[in-house]
Amino acid sequence: MTESNPSPHRSAPVDHSATIKASLKRRYRAERRFRWYGRAAIAFGLAAVLVLFVDIISKGHGAFKTTHIAVPIHYDLDSLGIDSINDNQQLALANWDALFKSGMRQLLPEASGRSQRRELYRLISNGAGYDLKDRLQANPQLVGQRERIWLLADDDIDTYFKSLRDGEPYTARVSDQQIAWIDQLYASGDIATRWNRNFFTRGDSREPEQAGIWGAVMGSLFTLVITFALSFPIGVAAAIYLEEFAPRNRFTDFIEININNLAAVPSIIFGLLGLAIFINFFQVPRSIPLLGGLVLTLMTLPTIIITSRAAIKAVPPSIREAALGMGASKHQMVLHHVLPLAMPGMLTGAIIGMAQALGETAPLLMIGMVAFIVDIPGGFSDPATVLPVQIFLWADSPERAFVEKTSAAIMVLLAFLIAMNTTAVWIRKRLERRW
Amino acid sequence: MDKLKFENHIASVFDEELEEIRNDLMAMGGQVEQQLTDAVQAICEADSQLAEQVIQRDHRVDEMELEIDEACVLVIARRQPAASDLRLVVAVTRAVADLERIGDEAKKIAKHALELTESGPSPMGYSEVRHLAQSVSQILRNALDSFARFDADTALATMQEDKKIDMEYKTALRELVTYMMEDPRSISRVINILWVVRSLERIGDHAKNLCEQVVFVVKGKDIRHRNGQ
Amino acid sequence: MANDNERPIPGASVGEQFQDNARMSMRNVNIFYGEKQAIFDVSLDIGQNQVMAMIGPSGCGKSTFLRSLNRMNDTIEGCRVEGQIAMDGQNLYDEKLDVVELRARVGMVFQKPNPFPKSIYDNVAYGPKIHGLAESRVDLDEMVESSLRKASLWNEVKDRLHQPGTGLSGGQQQRLCIARAIAVNPEVILMDEPCSALDPIATAKIEELIEELSENFTIAIVTHSMQQAARVSHRTAYFHLGRLIEVNPTEQVFTMPEHELTEGYITGRFG
C-alpha cells in the first residue's frame, strides 16, 4: 500500500475578527446609504404623484359645480308664439329664449334699454332655452303654470362668480353692470353654484357651461371594447403559437425581432398605418370607435404578445413534463395546463396594453377621432372622440372655463383607468393559482 | 481486480478510518502472535513468570477486540461502506473474533504452562509442543501477512499449510498416547501437554479462518465451510 | 497506481445485460443532442416486474436514457435516438407508434413532485379523462380511489379529495404523482430521481411503495442515492460518461462489482 493522500491543507486559523469588525461599520453604513437612496427615490415619485393630483384636483374640482341663476318662468304658449305643445314643428320654431328672457326681466326689472337687456340676457347660458324646451316636453302639464327654476349661467358669469371666492375676481369678460346684477342676485340668494349634472351626461359643446365628458367616456369605452376584443385573443394566440408550437428557426427569430421592434414604434405611425389601410384601402368611415379600436389593436398587440409570451415561459416546465408524461397531446397540455397558469400574467399584459390604449392620443388624431362631436355615441359606428382627445381639445380651447373642465376630464380619465385596473387585478386574483 | 485499494475516497476521513482499522487489526495480530510465542516459551523453559505475564496480558487482547469492533460498527453506521470497503469491514470484524480466540488459546497454554512448571521439570512431550508451535506460529504469521498485503494467493497457500498442522497434531497425539502407555505416572502431566497441543491445533484453525477472510476481501467469495477450491 | 480517469473506458458493458423475461429491451442505443453524443451503444433488458436501478455520476446520461424509454426526449429539440428500444417486441421509435399511446403504457414520475395545480381528485383523474378510460363518473371515482390506494395515499387524502394537490407535503405530492401515473394502468413506470427532493421519511415511504408496485409494474428508476438503489432494486445498471459500464443483480453490484469503475463509484472514491 502506498501512503494515503496528503491530508488537505490545513493552515492555522488566523483571527480575522478584528478586520471583519472594522469593515462591518463601513458595510452597514453603505447599506444604510443605499436604503436611503431607495427611500428618496420613492419619496420623489410619491411627491410627483401628489403634486400632480393636488394640481389637477385643485384646478378641476370646480368643474363639478357650476353657477346657476334662479329664474321665475311662466310657461306661456303666447310668449312662445305657438298654440299647441304637441306639434313638433311648432315646438322647433318656438321662441324658447323668450321664456327665460321675460323671467330675467322680472328678476331684475331695473334693466332698461336694448343694450342693458342684452347684457341681462347674457347672464344666462344660451342653451337655457333648450333646457326649458326639454322640461316642458317632458312635463306638458306645466303649460300655463309658473315656477322658479335654476337655469345655467353663462360660462363667463360662472368663471367670474367662482373667482369671487378667491379674492381676485376675474372680471375680464363681464361688465360692471353685470357685476352689479350678480351682487344683487347673490344678496337675494338667486345665484348659486350647484352640482354640474351636465358635465357627466352631455357631449362636447362650444359653450363651456354646456360641455360634458360623457360622449368621450362612451367613445373611449367603445374603442377599448373593440381593442380588447381584437388584441387579446389575437395576441394570446400568437404568443401561444410562437412559444409552444413554432419551430425555432430564422423565420421565427425574424418574427420575434419584429414584434419587439413594433412595441417600440411611435404610436403616431400606427395612426398613419390606420389612415392608409383602414380608411383609404378598406374604406372604413373615419372618426368611429371601430376604426379607433382597430388602430389601437395594432398598437397594443406587441405589448400583449410580449407579456403573454413571458407569462407562458414562466409556467414551470415540470407542469408541462407532467402533462406530456401522462400522455397529453401538446394542445391538451397547452389548453389544460399552460393557459390557465399563464392567464394571470397574460391579463397583466392586457391591462398594460389597455392602459396604454386608453391614454393614447396621437394615432387617433390621424384617423379623425379629433372631430368636434356633440352627440353621445350609441354604438361602434357612431362618430366619437375619446377621453385623451377630449382633454387635448379642451386644453386647446380659448375659453377660460375650459381650464377647469380640462382638469376635471383628466380626473375622469384617471378614474376610468383606476376602475379598469382594479377590475383586472380583481380578475387576476381570482384566476391566480399557486403551484 | 488484481489490486485492492482502500484509499482515494472522496471523503479522506473515510480513508483514515479504514487505515486505522487495518492498523489496529495488525497491532492486535502482532500482540496475539507475541502471546503465543511467549506461552510456548513459558512451557518449554518452565518459566512461570512469563506464563503469568501471558495470562495477564490477555485482557489487553480482549480490549483490542472491543475497540476494533466498535470502530467497524461506526464505519458501517457512518459511511455505509459498499463493495470492497464493506467486505473489508466485515472481514475485520470476523478476523478480530478469530484473533481473540487465538489469544484465549494462548492464555490456556500459559495456564497449562503454570501447572506443568508446578509439577517439576521434565522434557517429556516438549519436542512435540515446540515442533507444532513452530508450524502454528508460521502459519499465523503467514495469515497475518496475507491480511496485511491482501494477498489471496498467500492466503490460499497458507490454508493448505493448515492440513500439515492437522497431520502433525495427529502424530503428536499418537506420541503422547505412547508416553502415557509407557509411563502411567506421567498421565496427568501428559494430559496437560495434550491440552496444549490441542490449543495449538485450534490456533491453526483460527489462522486458517483469517486466510478465508483475506480471500473474501480480495475475491468477494465466501469460502468458509467449503472444502477444496 | 494508475488513475481511473486515464484508463480507457471499455466499449462493451460487463454483467448480465440480457434477461429471459424482458419487458423492455434496448439494443445498441445511441442518443445525441445535436452534435453531442450523450449515450453510447447501450444494450440492456428490463425484465417483467423487475425494479431496475440506474446509477452513475451526474451527467452520465442515465436520465437521458430513462427519458428515451417513453420518448420524453422528443420534446427536446435536436435530440436524436438511434438503435432499438422495444417494449414487448414493438419498437418505440417506429413511425407508426403513437407517442401519446406509448406514454399511457409507460408512465413517468419526475424528480420534483409536480402535481397539477388542481384538486387531488382531478390530478389522478386527469390521465383516465384524457385517454377516455372511464365510462362514467362512478367508474372514474373508482379509478381514482384504487390508484390512490395503490400509491398508499388514500387514507391520508380521502377526506380532502377536492382540495388542491399542491397543498400536500412533498412526499405526499410525489405519491400523488405516482398515483396519477398508475391511474392509466401503465405497464412500465419510469422514475427520475423520485426522492431527491424528499426527506428521509417520505423517501422511505416511496421506497416501500416501489417495493409494492413491483408486484404489478415493471419499474426503471434513476437515483443518485446508491443506498436507495441497493434497497429497492433487483438489478442495478451503472452508467459512466454515457456508457453502460455494468449491469448485474443489485446484491452483486453492492458487494462484489465486476468493473472497477462501478467499484470506485459505489465505494465513493470516484475520481
Image (spheres, coloured by chain):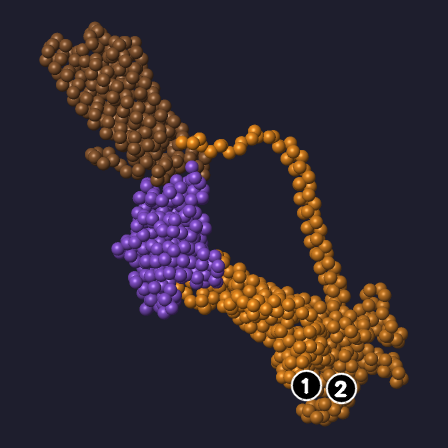
> Label 1, on which residue?
A137
Question: In the rendered picture, chain A carries what hue?
Answer: orange
**Placement of A383 over or under A245, stated as above or below:** below
Residue A62 horizontal/vertical position (percent) = 75, 68
Residue B101 horizontal/vertical position (percent) = 27, 24
What chain is colored purple? C
Q: Residue at x 70, y 47 (%)?
A: A36
Nearest the viewer among A130 and A358 is: A358
- Name the disc covering residue A96, or none: 2
Chain where mark 1 sits? A
Q: Residue at x 15, y 16 (%)?
A: B176
Q: Please say whether residue C8 is visible from this viewpoint.
A: yes
Residue A124 horizontal/vertical position (percent) = 79, 79
Chain where mark 2 sits? A
Question: In the rendered picture, chain B carries what hue?
Answer: brown
Neighbor class of circle 1 (other Cα within 10 Å; few <14, some 14-19, many 20+) is some
Q: Are marks 1 and 2 in contact (CB under 8 Å)?
A: no
